[in-house]
Amino acid sequence: MTGTGADEAKRRAKAHFARIVAEYLPHEGVDMGPMFGTQGLRVRGKVFAFVGSGGLLIVKVPADRATEWAASSSATRMVMNGREMREWLTFTLDDAATWPYAIAEAYAYLDRITP
């Protein structure tokens, strides 16, 4: 997608993400903060979910769970500088029904490991 198509996809993704974010902000220690030039959902300062370029949802889950998601769904591992990230997954807006579950897993994971 280029131009307005990409912009529209990102706008729609951010709107969908915002509805889910509203459920997490009341939790203690949860807020929004910067991540790769956008705003991400954080617990005690650690980002666990955000909408990246192209309107992709990006979440952090345990490496073994990322492997399971990638093998059994359309989720893919996030790639940075040509390297697959072990704990980061991407979901397209076509998977919008899955976003709440992915974000819930990411929140549970970061809430558990973040002091």
Image (spheres, rainbow, N blue to C red):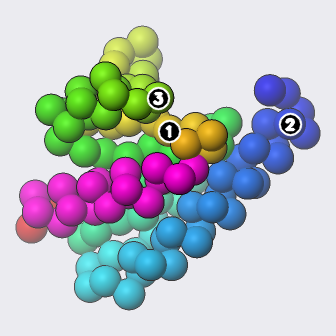
**Residue 6 as seen in the image, left or right of residue 32:** right
Inspect this view and state whether residue 22 appears. Answer: yes
Residue 3: image tag = none
Q: Is residue 110 magenta?
A: yes
Instruction: Name the residue: 75% across, 54% down.
Output: 11
Q: Quadrant of residue 86?
A: top left
Label 1 residue SS = strand
Q: Is residue 89 magenta?
A: no
Q: Are marks 3 and 1 in contact (CB under 8 Å)?
A: yes
Mark 2 is on which residue type?
Gly
Label 2 residue SS = helix
Mark 1 is on which residue type?
Phe
Disc 1 residue crowd, few under 14, some 14–19, many 20+, Cα 10 Å:
many
Residue 5: image tag = 2
Instruction: Name the residue: 80% across, 26% down.
Output: 1
Mark sitting earlier along the chain (2/1): 2
Mark 3 is on which residue type?
Ser
- Indicate the position of residue 55 as horizontal and vertical percent values: 65, 43
Distance (Cα) linking label 3 and label 1: 7 Å
Residue at mark 3? 74
Instruction: Name the residue: 47% across, 29% down.
Output: 74
Label 3 residue SS = loop
Q: Nearer the viewer, mark 2 or mark 3?
A: 3
Q: Quadrant of residue 84?
A: top left
Distance (Cα) linking label 2 and label 3: 21 Å
Which portion, as a residue range, is magenta? 96-113
Mark sitting earlier along the chain (3/1): 3
Disc 2 residue crowd, few under 14, some 14–19, many 20+, Cα 10 Å:
few
Residue at mark 1? 91
**Residue 60 as seen in the image, left or right of residue 90:** left
Instruction: Name the residue: 28% across, 68% down.
Output: 43
